[in-house]
Amino acid sequence: MRVQGLPDTGIRAQIPIPPTDPPAPMPPPGEPPGPDLPEPPIDEPPGPDQPTPDAPDIPPLGDPPGDPPTRMN
C-alpha cells in the first residue's frame, strides 16, 4: 500500500534484524546494602586561630606578617 506524500520505504525496512548471539544472562543481584551508619556528632567549629581538622598542611601564600618595610626618602 502506498500513502500519498510519504516515501516508499518498503516492508523490509520495518522488520528488525534479529541478533546473531543471544544476550548475556543477567548477573545475580548483589547483597543488599547494610544499615545506615550513624551520623557523626557535630562539634563546635574551630576558632579563627585554630586549623580545621581536615585542612591540609599547606602554609598560607605570601610572606608572614612582620615589620613594615622601611621607606627610603
Image (spheres, rainbow, N blue to C red):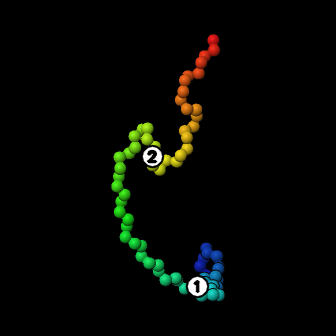
57 w.r.t. 41: above or below: above
| Image spot of residue 12 (x, y percent) | 64, 85
Which of the 4 image quarters holds residue 24? Answer: bottom right
Looking at marks 2 and 1 on the same chain, the residue that comes earlier in the sequence is marked by 1
Which residue type does callout 1 highlight? Pro
22 w.r.t. 48: above or below: below
| Residue linked to disc 1 | 23
Q: CA distance from mark 2 to mark 1?
A: 53 Å
67 w.r.t. 54: above or below: above
46 w.r.t. 30: above or below: above
Instruction: Looking at the picture, tell me which residue is in the foreground, 30 or 47.
Output: 47
**Residue at (63% x, 14% y) in the render:** 72
Q: Which element carries disc 1, helix, strand or loop? A: loop
Q: Which element carries disc 2, helix, strand or loop? A: loop
| Image spot of residue 54 (x, y percent) | 47, 50
Quarter of the figure that contains the C terminus: top right
Quarter of the figure that contains the N terminus: bottom right
- Residue 11 in view of the camera: no
Which residue type does callout 2 highlight? Thr
| Image spot of residue 35 (x, y percent) | 37, 70
Which of the 4 image quarters holds residue 15? Answer: bottom right
**Residue at (40% x, 43% y) in the render:** 46
Q: Residue furthest top?
A: 73
Classed neighbour count for the residue bearing mark 2: other residues with Cα under 10 Å, few (<14), some (14–19), many (≥20): few
| Residue linked to disc 2 | 52
Q: Are the residues flagged by discs 2 and 1 in contact, CB closer than 8 Å?
A: no
- Residue 38 in view of the camera: yes
Nearer the camera: disc 2 or disc 1: 2
